[in-house]
Amino acid sequence: MYEYLNGQVVDIQPAYIVLDVNGVGYLIRVANPFRFEVGNDLTKIYIHQTISDTAQTLYGFSSLKEKQLFEKLLAVSGIGAKSALAILANGDQQAIVKAISQDDVTYLTKFPGVGKKTAQQIVLDLKDKLDDFTTNSLFEPTSTAIASTDNAALADALAALTALGYKERDLKKAEKALQGEPEQTTDAYLSAALKLLTK
């Protein structure tokens, strides 16, 4: 089992990144690939590995606490890896912890794959298990994406929303709201879209 990998990000796609570690490329599924930058700098990514009959999958996180929150979400009945990543995608883990601790089922149902029953199960299972997640400093900031020179950044952000499971009506809503904004990085577009969709 991996704890973390340290390497260079060599490819960024809407649902994953590829991390080169000493000449071996690891495909790592992450909540928001556009938080990372392709480049020569070493990037430390905390890893959760799942093994099934048909696949071995690596999930990556920019901090140990983000990984631990993902694993707590995975332990909830009805939450799979895709839903857990979608919940973590906006990067605001404190809002998620607050929603769970305050029984805010409505907030939790705004994420794809999370209905009312599942949101209630999240609260029931995790409400008293998140004491270690109540300090802002526990979540380390993540790197920002390289600025895009055209509106491919918005297209990439919409592709990332699709990979997270958001429906076409959500994509159209986000695209309409963001088209009028000044040009931003993919990460900024994606963060803005996720805030809009979870209001």
Image (cartoon, helix red, strand yellow):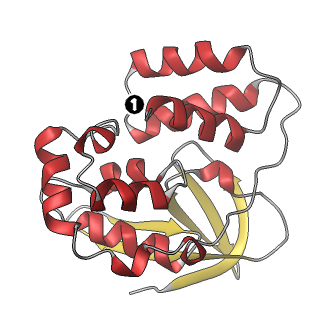
Residue at the image position 45 percent from the left and 54 percent from the top: 95
Is 194 placed left or right of 140 in the picture?
left
Residue 121 is situated, as x and y percent measured from the top left of the image, at 13, 55
Task: Classify mark 1: helix, strand or loop.
Answer: loop
**Image-quadrant location for residue 22:** bottom right
- Does residue 64 appear to the left or right of 189 in the view shown? left
- 32 shown above or below 137: above
Residue ID for mark 1: 166
Along the viewing direction, whichever of 25 and 104 lies nearer the viewer: 104
Q: Is residue 23 above or below residue 29?
A: below
Q: For residue 38, which quarter of the picture?
A: bottom right
Q: Quadrant of residue 20?
A: bottom right
Q: Vertically, is 47 above or below 161? A: below
Q: Which quadrant is home to the C terminus?
A: top left
Residue at 56% x, 50% y: name it: 32
Q: Residue furthest front?
A: 102
How many other residues sit within 10 Å of disc 1, few (<14), some (14-19) or many (≥20)? many
The N terminus: image quadrant: bottom left
User: Which residue is at the front of the view, 156 or 182?
Assistant: 182
Seen in the image, is 108 located left or right of residue 162? left
Residue 21 x/y as whole percent: 67, 79
Q: Amino acid at mark 1?
A: Tyr
Q: Nearer the viewer, residue 28 or 166?
A: 166
